Image: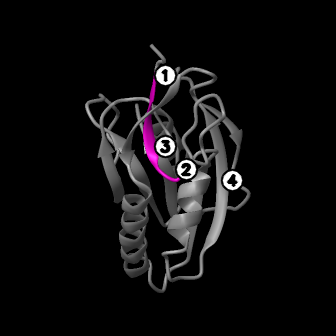
Amino acid sequence: MKIGKTLVSAEEIKDKLTEMGNQITIDYRDRDLLMVGILKGAFVVMADLSRHVDLPLEFDFMAVSSYGASTKTSGVVRILKDLDEEIEGRDVLIVEDIIDSGLTLHYLMKNLLVRKPATLEIAALLIKEGIERPPLEVRYEGFRIPPDFVIGYGLDYQGKYRNLPYVAVMEDED
């Protein structure tokens, strides 16, 4: 496998996260916002997005798995790390690096809604197009991309490439 063409540049990501952060600041003014990052990929997005939110924030993280070592989702979701904070009555914003099949996020939304947050919204840097998925309302949306396997900006291939400052397609080396 090798790094292919760049889909979203570092500059485009920075501009989009600034725009998303400004809107989150407006929407959550005078509210108690808890940003929840889905590990491992979303930590990069959440760190940079949060710097553009001009509000006192709290952070929490969940770790879930539906991929294993594959490049395609297995459809089986396992919670590897649950939230440390109670979310009942809180405004919760789930931060995702990418929405692919949507199965993991759909499962998480159902799991978190049972805990009775005041609001539960989604911010996602990337959404793959052309993929059938369960219904998800993404309040803060970054970029729509083709259904290729991508790396960079938190996204990995076998644990590597999360540190790339841009998003690129991962290609076979033939």
Residue 23: percent from left, percent from top: 36, 74
Q: Position of residue 52 (x, y in %)?
A: 48, 75
SS of the residue under disc 1: loop
| Residue on which the image places disc 4 | 83
Residue depicted at x 53% and y 20%: 74
Mark 4 → mark 2, Cα distance in angstroms: 10 Å
Tell me the amino acid under the disc marked 1: Lys
**Tag shown at residue 112:** 2
N-terminal of the pair, mark 4 or mark 3, is 4
Which of the two discs, 2 and 1, labels the residue nearer the N terminus? 1
The amino acid type, in three-letter code, at marker 2 is Leu
Mark 1 and mark 4 in contact? Answer it, CB < 8 Å: no
Residue extending furthest bottom? 30
Residue at the (43%, 65%) spot, across then down = 14
- Residue 95 image offset from top left, x and y in percent: 51, 55
- Is 113 contained in the magenta span? no
Q: Residue at x 33, y 51 (%)?
A: 143
CA neighbours of label 2 inside 10 A, class few (<14), some (14 to 19), many (20+): some
Instruction: Report the magenta residues as a range.
Output: 165-171
Q: Amino acid at mark 4?
A: Leu
Q: Earlier in the sequence, mark 4 or mark 2?
A: 4
According to the image, label 1 marks what residue? Answer: 72
Q: Nearer the viewer, mark 1 or mark 3?
A: 1
Give how far apart the Cα atoms at labels 2 and 1 are: 24 Å
Which of the numbered marks, if any, corresponds to residue 110? 3
